[in-house]
Image: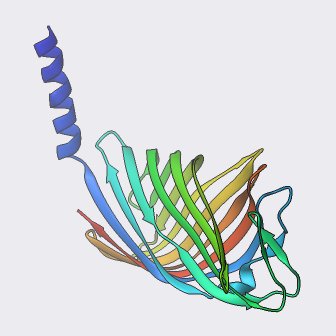
Amino acid sequence: MKKILAFILLSFLFNEVSLSSTSLNFELGQAQNTFNQVRIDSESGTKFNLVHALESTSYYRLNLIQTFKSGNGIRLLYAPLKFSGHKTFSHDINFNGVNFSAGDKIQAQYQFNSYRGTYFKELISKRNLLLRLGGTLKVRDAFIELKQEDRKKAKKNIGVVPLVYLYSKYKWDNNFLLTLDFDGLIAPQGRAFDVALSLGYFFSPAFQFDLGFRMLEGGVDNEKVYNFSQVNYYFTAVQFNF
């Protein structure tokens, strides 16, 4: 009986994989941090705006999407992001127990790497319209560091956040594409929104090209960390379908 069940399961998995489709999406562009309020720790630290200390930077993202015959699928996302720069503040800053003086340049680094795994269901899959809905587990790898002369202090924050995933693509008969890509959720401890809108062209079933705008917004407010930030992305993307 066990052998029969194992054979049925393996046959099902083989059938799903053999009739599945794979897409690899590579996104590249420029990122600008337009808002970044920080206070660490939340009770004794100084609240300050980090955004003017951070220069815009280039970035990239990698998306791997596997869709099965049943219409279910998985997505794996790798999205590193790092800003750096410097600023002279007009007031003293207490950052994670270390005081940084006003009037002297402070060097800053801000990292917000994201690793996500998504399970989705294709609710609509037609020639001109695609709609996916699912759930995402996001691993947040955040890091803030301030440095002034011989003083240096950093705060690292790693956490897992559940998000709602929504993806929609509309293709006109002339092969132009309009795509919406969304991960987001609001919780008592904070919020996270990652939404992109892009216009592209479907060159062939194996290749498409997109130009778009993405916004990453959200943050956390707890006893140790207060940080709310917004990043605007301007990107090009290519997608290969197998």
**Residue 150 sits in which quadrant?**
bottom right
Q: Where is residue 176 in the image (x, y as percent from the top left)?
A: 44, 77
Query: Is residue 152 shown above or below 23?
Result: below
Q: Is residue 212 visible?
A: yes
Position of the N terminus by quadrant: top left
Front position in the image: 138 or 88:
88
* Residue farthest to the right, as pictured: 91
Query: Is residue 212 shown above or below 127?
Result: below
Q: Position of residue 210 (x, y in %)?
A: 44, 78
**Residue 145 sits in which quadrant?**
bottom right
Left or right of 139: which side holds 147? right
Left or right of 202: which side holds 200? right
Left or right of 201: which side holds 12? left
Query: Is residue 146 shown above or below 104?
Result: above
Q: Residue at x 75, y 76 (%)?
A: 35
**Residue 187 sits in which quadrant?**
top right
* Residue farthest to the top, as pictured: 1
Q: Position of residue 188 (x, y in %)?
A: 78, 44
Front position in the image: 153 or 143:
153
Q: Which residue is drawn at 44% across and 50% down?
A: 117
Position of the C terminus by quadrant: bottom left
Left or right of 39: which side holds 178? left
Q: Which residue is drawn at 59% across and 83% down?
A: 84
Front position in the image: 210 or 171:
210
Q: Position of residue 231 (x, y in %)?
A: 65, 74
Q: Residue at x 30, y 45 (%)?
A: 68
Q: Can residue 210 be seen in this view?
A: no
